[in-house]
Each structure stands twice: as structure tokens, then as C-alpha cells.
Amino acid sequence: THRLQGILNNLLMLTRLQARGVVREPVDLAELTRQSIEAHASQAARRRVRIQSELPLEIIVPGDEPWLRRAVDNLIDNAIAFAEARPEQAPQVTVQLRHEAERAVLEVKNQGPGISPEIRSRLFERFVTTRRDTGGSGLGLAIVAAVAEQHGGRVEVLCPGPPETSFRLTLPAND
């Protein structure tokens, strides 16, 4: 029942986002990303995943802070969940944020099994998951895609893996 309640809450939140849009206020995406990494530290530690980050002091984007946080959280959560060790190296997640031609570009990478070819084309659709057995609802990446779209940005798979899987979230940035 808890899992079903979580799925329904996520589905309702996603529907609200798509129906109502977002509030646009200045948000420091660098600070928000730092907070997300810190919030995921215990999850990473439990899985013995090392999070490496390259973040500037500040990148301001016009957006809705709770929704942007949710998108960043979902990308980092997935990267940790699918990170695998390499020979003589612990599992690692890399989070990079940069300013590029009036855009904020967030890339989240891990070493892992990659995204199976049969779901790559549907990856950002609702209920598409490879983690049903461990609690995945298939709404996390759909939420990331909706948040990106509502903010005038986009999310894409840069590299479906293996050995590296990487996602890029691009949003308009204030100069």
C-alpha cells in the first residue's frame, strides 16, 4: 500500500505539473545541486558509491525550485541506483554543472549496466522502469522530462552505456 500510495502521489504531482506549469523565480541551480548531492550522501554510502562533482559557485536559472530539485534528485537517485564497481575502483557517480551559451547544463554520469535497447526510446514515458523489483515506479524520468519541458529545457541520454550511462539536463540560464 505504501508503494501504491507513492506511485499515485508521483502521478498526481506529474499531472499537476503538466496542467499548471511552473512558477519562474531566480534559482541557484549550483546550490540546489549541492543540496541534492548532500541529501543523497547516505544512499550513496549504503551502496558504497562515491559521488564526484564539478559545480561552479553559482548558476541562476528562472524556475520553480521544488520542481527543479525534484528533477535533479531523480537524476542523482537513478545514477546511484545503477552505479556499479569497475575493476579496482568503487562505483562512482559524476555530477557536472556548467554554463554554456545562455544555458545551464547538468550532466549526471555513472558506470553501470546501461539502458537496455528495448526501453531506450520510451525512457522518459510514464511507468517505464527497470527497477520494479526494487521500488522503481517508472515516473522518475517522466518527471525529469516534464520539469525540463515546463522550464523551456530538455533532458536527454548522452550515452546509454555500458560502460558509462550519462544524462544531460539543459535549462535556460540568466546571464
Image (cartoon, helix red, strand yellow):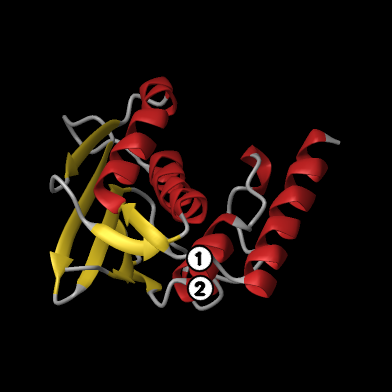
Residue 115 figure quarter: bottom left
> Hey, what amino acid is under mark 2?
Gln
Q: Where's residue 137, x and y in %?
A: 67, 51
Do the numbered discs 2 and 1 sit on residues whose CB atoms are within 8 Å?
Answer: yes
Vertical placement of residue 30 versus 86, above or below = below
Element class at badge 2? helix
Please count the marks in the image.
2
Q: Which residue occupies the foreground of this view, 59 or 93?
A: 59
Q: Secondary structure at mark 1?
A: helix
Q: Which residue is mark 1?
A: 147
Whole-number angstrom distance, CA of label 2 to CA of label 1: 5 Å
Residue positioned 33% across, 70% down in the render: 171
Which quadrant: the N terminus? Answer: top right
Q: Give the residue at mark 2.
A: 150
Where residue 68 sits, quadrant-wise, is bottom left
Is 110 drawn above or below residue 21 in the view shown? above
- Mark 1: amino acid: Val
Q: In the rendered image, which quarter contains the C terminus?
A: bottom left
Where 105 sits versus 47, above or below? below
